[in-house]
């Protein structure tokens, strides 16, 4: 996956709303500030519909390497 850069923010995960929320919580519990960015408006206007598009988990560029390690470790 090629990560997109949004200024000082970089993408470390892309998936459904629920998965993105879990990854965001995992990162924040590891001390990494994270935010969600919706690729479409569907998840914003109807987050419980289950038909939302992909949601990106974004972190500060300075924390990217550590954040990627945290995300990768969660799959082990």
Image (tube, grey):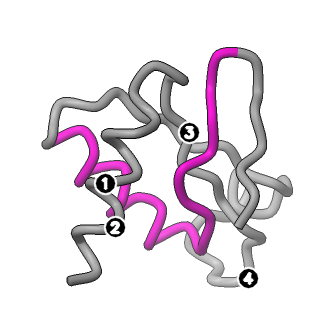
Give yes or no for contact between labels 2 and 3 (Cβ–Cβ under 8 Å). Answer: no
Q: Nearer the viewer, residue 62 or 46?
A: 62
What residue is shown with label 4?
51
Mark nearer the N terminus (4 vs 2): 4
What residue is shown with label 1?
69
Gap in Å between the C-alphas at discs 3 and 4? 21 Å
Gap in Å between the C-alphas at discs 4 and 1? 29 Å
Label 4 neighbour load within 10 Å: few <14, some 14-19, many 20+: few
What residue is shown with label 3?
58
Q: What percent of the width, then of the height, locates residue 7?
A: 75, 17
Mark nearer the N terminus (3 vs 1): 3
Gap in Å between the C-alphas at discs 2 and 3? 15 Å
Give yes or no for contact between labels 2 and 1 (Cβ–Cβ under 8 Å). Answer: yes
Which residue is at the far right?
40
Give yes or no for contact between labels 4 and 1 (Cβ–Cβ under 8 Å). Answer: no
- Report helix, strand or loop for mark 1: helix
């Amino acid at each position: 996956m090629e990560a997109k850069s949004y200024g000082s923010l970089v993408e470390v995960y892309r998936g459904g709303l629920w998965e993105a929320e879990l990854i965001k919580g995992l990162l924040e519990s590891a001390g990494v500030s994270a935010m969600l960015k919706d690729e479409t408006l569907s998840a914003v206007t109807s987050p419980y519909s289950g038909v939302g598009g992909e949601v990106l988990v974004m972190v500060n560029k300075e924390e990217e390497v550590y954040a990627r390690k945290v995300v990768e470790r969660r799959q082990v």
